[in-house]
Image (cartoon, grey):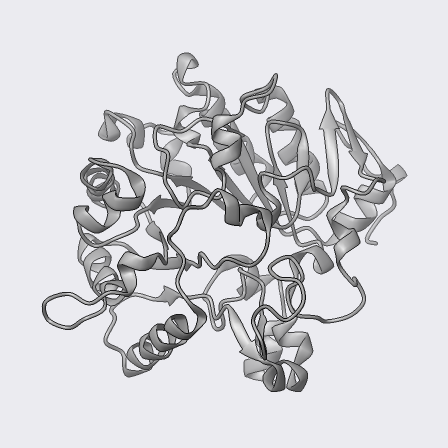
Amino acid sequence: MRNNTKTRKFNFEIDPKFVEYFDGMHQVFLYLVDECQLNCSQCLYKLDNNFYLARRDIDPKQALCMIEDFFELGARKLTLMGGEPTLYRKSEKNQPLFDLIEKANALGYEYVRIDTNGQFEDGSLLLAHPSMRKLDEITFSLDGPTAQINDLVRGEGSFDCAVENIKCAVDLGYTVNVTCCIHKGLVERNAEGELYISQMAHFVSELGVKVLNFHDLFKGGIPRDHWTGDNDISIDKWFEVWTGMQKNIESGIYSIPLRIPQSFVTEEDFVGDPEYYGYCSVKTGDRILVHPNGIMRVCSLMIGTPYGIARYHENEIYWDDGYTNEMQSHDINTNTPCTNQVKGDAYGCMKPTCVSFKPKQNEFVWKLKLDWERRRYNG
């Protein structure tokens, strides 16, 4: 540990076990609000969007105190998300959202971003706000290069609205990225024989997007399988697509970087480099996910479940000492395939990697803070 609890000043009364575990924290994901205009069939967060407890959002004062305490623990990247973060205290004209951006900048966060579905009205007015202009990145969710493909999973009209706001953000000079879920519609081919996932890369680059980031939707024998819709693809199909996309990337046909999850490796490859392929955020404690219902967790695959690492309430952060502590399913001191995705041999000889494992990705935290990628490629 860099310092002990007594020499640090925190806003929350924090369990020492929390401080010890997160002493290597690099990034924070604040799920500000459990509310969204959409009901996407592939949404990992669907249960929280549709099942409200006493709290539907994070109290603004708590949110400000959290990002200050997390900065003290080492966090330098902050992502504001939901639900839909642009709905956060909309009745207060989004001022708590703006306050968070301002506070993060004042504290010294090196990278502050927002992850949005792009369904906000009066986009030019919101995006022109002085506080929003201090964001380092705006990431829009878009799941297809056409309205027909995107709206099949995200809802009618969502494509046109998101694209309009993407164009507005680009025109205003924002660094704009797009996140795309790899669903069945994207691994089909268009009239020219090109995969729609490949067409997606060309489409967003023409819009002025800087990076296209993909998420997978595999069914892995975990709780999210029951609420993320029938959009997943087979492993064989994925390797066919992944191999083709990697060849395209290496040949330089895309004008922007693509961040694509490898998702699986052979047992032989894993055994050959377990430190590399065994990356797990639960084992490194490099991130924290904070939700309105009081749960703090590390792995996004646990969203919609009671599992987490800690709880917060009023001015205290409690370590989870019970069976719902997500660390219990991990051998913390051993490099293993992802144990949150599958139990047993459901994938045969293929071993699942962390959903965040995207080799050679040019991403703030992995490039500057986590050194396993540097060791792998630079010796």
**Which image quadrant: the N terminus?**
bottom right
Q: Relative to 118, say whether 379 is above or below.
A: below
Residue at left 45%, top 26%?
35
Question: In the rendered picture of this protein, how many numbered marks are placed on residues?
Answer: 0
Residue at left 66%, top 32%?
66
* Residue 41 x, y percent position in the rendering: 37, 42
User: In this image, 193 relative to 244: left or right?
Assistant: left
Residue at left 61%, top 74%?
277
* Residue 368 x, y percent position in the rendering: 57, 63
Q: Relative to 39, say whether 191 is above or below.
A: below
Residue 190 makes an appearance in the image: yes
Residue 110 makes an appearance in the image: no
Q: Relative to 193, say whether 165 is above or below.
A: above
Residue at left 47%, top 36%?
46
Residue 87 quadrant: top left
Extreme-top residue of the structure? 91
Return the residue nearer the eye: 7 or 365.
365
* Residue 240 x, y percent position in the rendering: 35, 77
* Residue 8 x, y percent position in the rendering: 82, 38
Return the residue nearer the eye: 31 or 256.
31
